[in-house]
Amino acid sequence: MAENKQVLIGENLFDMSEGKPSLIVTHCKSCGTYFFPKSFTCHNPECVGKDVETTNLSRQGKVENYSVMNYPPPTPFVTQEPYEPIVCAAVEFPEGITIIGMMEGVTAEQVKIGMDVEVTVGTIYTKKTGDEVIAWKFKAV
Amino acid sequence: MTTPVVIGVGMMPFGKHPERTIVDMGAEVARAALLDAGLAPTDIDMGFFSNVLAGRLFGDATIGQNVLWEVGVNRIPVVNVENACTSGGTAFMLACNAIKAGEAEAVMVVGSEKTAVPQLGLINSGQTELDTQLGLVAPAGFALRACRHMADYGTTLEQLALVAVKNRRHGSLNPAAMYRQLTSVEEVLSSPMIVDPLTRLQCCPNADGAAAVVVASPARARRAGLLPGDPRWVSVRAALLATGSYENPQDLLRWETDYRAAALAYERAGLGPADVDVVELHDAFTIGEIIHCEALGLCPPGEGGLLVQSGATTLGGRVPVNVSGGLLSRGHPTGATGVAQLVELVQQLRGQAGARQVEGAKIGLAQCMGGDKSGDTKSCTMVVLGR
């Protein structure tokens, strides 16, 4: 039987080289702005700098906002029956960048503004072919 | 600088129209707008057509030429516009710019859309957008802000629901609205939860529909028999488009683009929030109306919930908002919405709005916001009309 593949939702989104996942960001050395996903240039219109570096973001941040999606997301997303509501959150990292993603291991009642979370990587849905789609997630620490 | 004048409007009831096509709905309102303006097809010298989803849902393209050909408008430049929920406002801005540049004397703007179709489901921000890949739906960006607005400002679930209740009461007075039955706070809050804390009745319905306006130079408006000072002389005090900055960390209590666009609209129109008599804004979700009212300066930041609760934005209040019923009750055929907002304002300023007339309305403002990128908005349009 063929192994089900794991498919990333995009290239160069996270780095696993140190065992635990970090989100890959672009840092502008001229103005200090961070960008996610990574980029080849600085998007700050007031910055004339072209000197950007790729770096790993801190692994932990705080929940700034959250919501619970009680309705299955549209295609390309595939959901199982019965649908389990997805908790999503906007997480602010110490570098001063906010990134939205799904929470894992928490219910709507448990998620709170200000909660400390870490970046994880996991399956966000399974395609009809059986392939698992992989993205970053957030988990309470 | 030439100040364009809106001289004709055309509208049809929004709703579920499975038997209608984008082209025949667009043609119906374009014909009505020509008749209202007292112009012949050959008087139109440029056309802008607004539609968002026909390419994705039906595989159609360049529909504007088909719509205008149906009403005998051809040969002239026709541009198809897609800018998410702001497509109609964007098309109108382009039409006004063509008049200001002296490139055209009378321009037709049509928006037509079918979204009450089974293949749509929950709308997303584009198939290849990372937000969509991640499963984030369009309401999520609003729900995240609602969560923060409640936590920081004490906005209540009841205040959110009151937006839907108010706009339904307004919709009950509008023959072109999709939903005309009254609703209550209890009914809104007990409807199924879509994206916490937004329940189904706090999310605008998918709809089919079309709307059109004809905008002209002042000289052309005079030749059409209008004079400045007539109730039908509705001038365009501002029509602009702003784009998101996608700055990070984002301000998840508001949209910076919304505030920036509003400030520019007031500056260009030479007036302030206190001068506005009637507002049509993008209430795709109840929290949207609350935050947009703050951005438009109708109340201080954080007090949008109190504003709706006070009754100030209800018909008969200090500054009625979404007297058409808004997207929540009129329905939201994406590409038609921005144009329908302008039809409503024109009818209000002419004193032709019937049971939902805002007495003595002289200045109307329309706001729309569209598209998502990393939780920020992609575009925001503002139009100020006055007589």
Image (spheres, coloured by chain):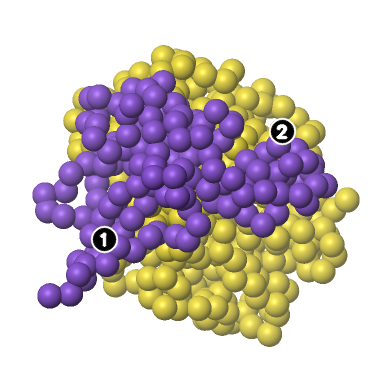
Chain colours: A purple, B yellow
Mark 2 on the same chain as mark 1? no
Q: Residue B263 carries which label?
A: 2
B134 vs A24, nearest the viewer:
A24
Dividing the picture into quadrants, the one containing residue B264 is top right
| Count of number-bearing discs | 2
Residue A38 appears in the picture as rendered:
yes
Residue B154, how many percent across, how many down?
Answer: 41, 14
Q: Residue A132 carries which label?
A: 1
Instruction: Please name the residue shown 23% across and 35% down the image.
Output: A105
B154 vs B299, nearest the viewer:
B154
Residue B205, how many percent across, how many down?
Answer: 33, 49
User: Quadrant where the C terminus of chain B lies?
Assistant: top right
Residue B196, how many percent across, how many down?
Answer: 30, 33
Furthest toward the bottom, the residue is B75
- Callout 1: few (<14), some (14-19), or many (20+) C-alpha neighbours within 10 Å? some
B343 vs A42, nearest the viewer:
A42
Instruction: Please name the residue shown 55% across and 28% down the image.
Output: A94
Q: Which mark is residue B63?
A: none
Instruction: Please name the residue shown 70% across and 54% down the image.
Output: A41
Q: In this view, does A73 lie above or below B36?
A: above
As shown in the figure, which amino acid type bears the numbered disc 2?
Answer: Ala
As shown in the figure, which amino acid type bears the numbered disc 1?
Answer: Glu
> Given the image, what chain letter belongs to the residue carrying mark 1?
A
Residue B82, how many percent across, how many down?
Answer: 56, 64
Residue A67 appears in the picture as rendered:
no
Instruction: Please name the residue shown 30% across and 49% down the image.
Output: A122
Q: What secondary structure is marked by label 1?
A: strand
